Amino acid sequence: MTHVIRRFTVFMFATLMVLALPAMAEDAAAKPSVVYHVDDHTRAIAAFRNITNQLKAAPDTRIVVVALGHGVDFLLDGAMDERKNPYEPMIDDLIFAGVEFKVCDNTLTSRQIDPDDVHPDVTRVPSGVVEITRLQQQGFAYLKP
């Protein structure tokens, strides 16, 4: 009898999975996810343009920006682009639009940057490359402006 119950349970589980696959695929297709890798602060404006364009074309996209190396510089207090425009209002606008920003703790430590000098709405992660890898394993598309 246990064998019959086990077979029935496996059959029911397999049936449920087959029925759930189209819904899971539809949800994944409906909500694209992208991770932007920024390791050079001079590429931040290009990343902002790409992100803004992406949100205009596909407003439901989940976007995460992971900054590491010299890419963290645009997230620091008082940081400005080459035209002396502050990054902070641009970052705030993107955060308001739902974009997540993450900064590499390894970079902060190795470059002796005080975490309090990083934009307050940026999440610290232990390793930027590990975070990018983790997000890609979750199905995020990888972009590097």
Image: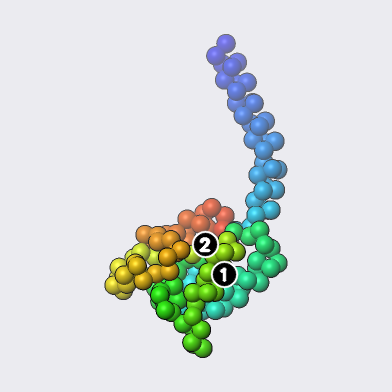
Question: Mark on residue 140?
Answer: none
Instruction: Of the two numbered discs 2 and 1 on the same chain, state the one appearing first in sequence.
Output: 1
Instruction: Say which amino acid is labelled 1.
Output: Asp
Is disc 1 placed on a helix, strand or loop? helix
Distance from disc 2 to disc 1, alpha carbons, whole Å, reads 11 Å
Res 77 quadrant in image: bottom left
Query: Is residue 92 shown above or below 87?
Result: above
Density class for disc 2 (Cα within 10 Å; few <14, some 14-19, many ≥20) is: some
Q: Tell me the residue at 32%/72% (across/down).
A: 113
Instruction: Give the x, y percent position of residue 24.
Output: 65, 44
- Regarding residue 44, the answer to whether it shows in the image is yes
Tally of numbered tags: 2
**Residue tagged by mark 2?**
100
Res 95 quadrant in image: bottom right
> For this view, does 56 lie left or right of residue 126?
right
Q: Nearer the viewer, residue 58 or 139?
A: 58
Instruction: Give the x, y percent position of residue 74.
Output: 45, 76
Q: Residue furthest bottom?
A: 83
Instruction: Give the x, y percent position of residue 134.
Output: 47, 55
Res 21 quadrant in image: top right
Q: Tell me the residue at 63%/60% (across/down).
A: 61
Instruction: Give the x, y percent position of residue 45.
Output: 54, 79
Is disc 2 placed on a helix, strand or loop? strand
> For this view, does 35 lie left or right of residue 30?
left
Tell me if label 2 and label 1 are in contact, CB under 8 Å: no
**Residue tagged by mark 1?**
93
